[in-house]
Image (spheres, grey):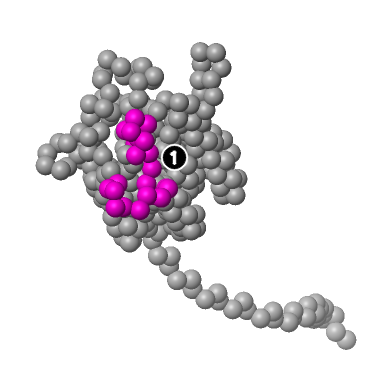
Amino acid sequence: MEAFNTAFSIGGASLAWNGIILAVSILVAVVVSGILVKKRGAYKDLALDACIIGIPAGLIGARLFAAISSKVAFASFFDLTKAGLNLPGALLFAGVGIAVYVRIKKLSVAEVFDVLAPGAFFGLAVGRWSDFFLCDGLGPVAGANVPKFFPLVTFTPQYFADGKTVAFAVFFLDFLVCAGLGVAALLLKNRKAGTASRVTIVLYLFAEFVLEWLRDGSTRQIVFGEVRFNQIVLMAMLLFFVGLSLYFAKRAEAPVPEENPAEPEPEEKPAEPEPEDRPEEPESEENPAEPKEPAEAPEEGDAE
């Protein structure tokens, strides 16, 4: 089985196919997100920054949840040569890490996730093929009477011992789900901010919850009955995103009150018509000279 997963070896070092597939999946996510960032005119380094933040956070979450579900021992937490990653934990920690980074940058979380969603789902679709080389993400063993054709049926670890044991490839169904949601995120990118990411994430979590029942139960921790640890995590995340979607939908319908409603301005009174220009009155002529006082009357006796 190790030889099946080995791409090539140089000396004592070897490069595994599942590592190559994971590297290609990251590259696909970065390239697709970078193209969409450029088209949307968003923060130009957003796709690269999201990978720088999301990948380490996702690895921590994947390893932590794998240890909690007993898929890997806590003593081997930092020993990456030991297999054991948990996809729901990776998605949860990567999403939270990117959301915190976006808030620090004072960007819209809804708009950023809408831009990143198509690339993330296409990257996940490519990454699911790493399970083919690890012989993981498998379902029930295919019976003798079942038509065996790839990719619905693939190798199991036992196949390399007996040459005949094969199982249904649940990872292939995962690939189809992720690729379809990537296309859906592209079709919804022009809708209201947050619509594309919330709808596709809710559908993805529900699909993963259902597909978890198809996977081989021997590699999954059963919590009670048929319910598995991963399903509890997925259901918690699903309820959170459904509640978040309902909250934003209700918030969008509610009228937004004005902070300081302006007082109604008094009606303007019609301007009074300006008085018509009166013709200038002709300047009055100077008053005629008053009659001069008569000469003094002659004194008596002077008259002849």
Asked whether the viewer can see residue 118, the reply is: yes
Q: Position of residue 121 (x, y in %)?
A: 44, 45
The residue at 29%/48% (across/down) is 144
Residue bearing mark 1:
129
Q: Write the residue at 40% across / 28% down.
A: 1
Instruction: Name the residue at 35% across, 49% down.
Output: 204
Give residue 209's position: percent from left, percent from top.
26, 47
**Residue 17 image point, x, y percent:** 48, 30
For residue 186, above or below residue 281 = above
For residue 48, side relative to residue 298 (left or right): left
Whether residue 159 appears in magenta in the rendering, the answer is: yes
Asked if one can make out residue 287 in the rendered structure from this viewpoint, the answer is: no
User: Please, what secondary structure does the residue beneath circle 1 have?
Assistant: loop
Residue 1 as seen in the image, left or right of residue 245: right
**Residue type marked 1:** Trp
**Residue 207 % position (x, y):** 31, 50
Residue 89, image quadrant: top left
Residue 275 vs 135, above or below: the answer is below
Tell me which corner region of the image, top left, top right, bottom left or bottom right, holds residue 60.
Answer: top left
Q: As drawn, which residue projects farthest toward the left?
A: 225
- In terms of depth relative to the viewer, which is nearer, 213 or 279? 213
Number of numbered callouts drawn: 1
> Which residue is rendered at x = 29% and y = 26% of the image?
64
Q: Quadrant of residue 84?
A: top left
Q: Which residues are magenta?
A: 142-164
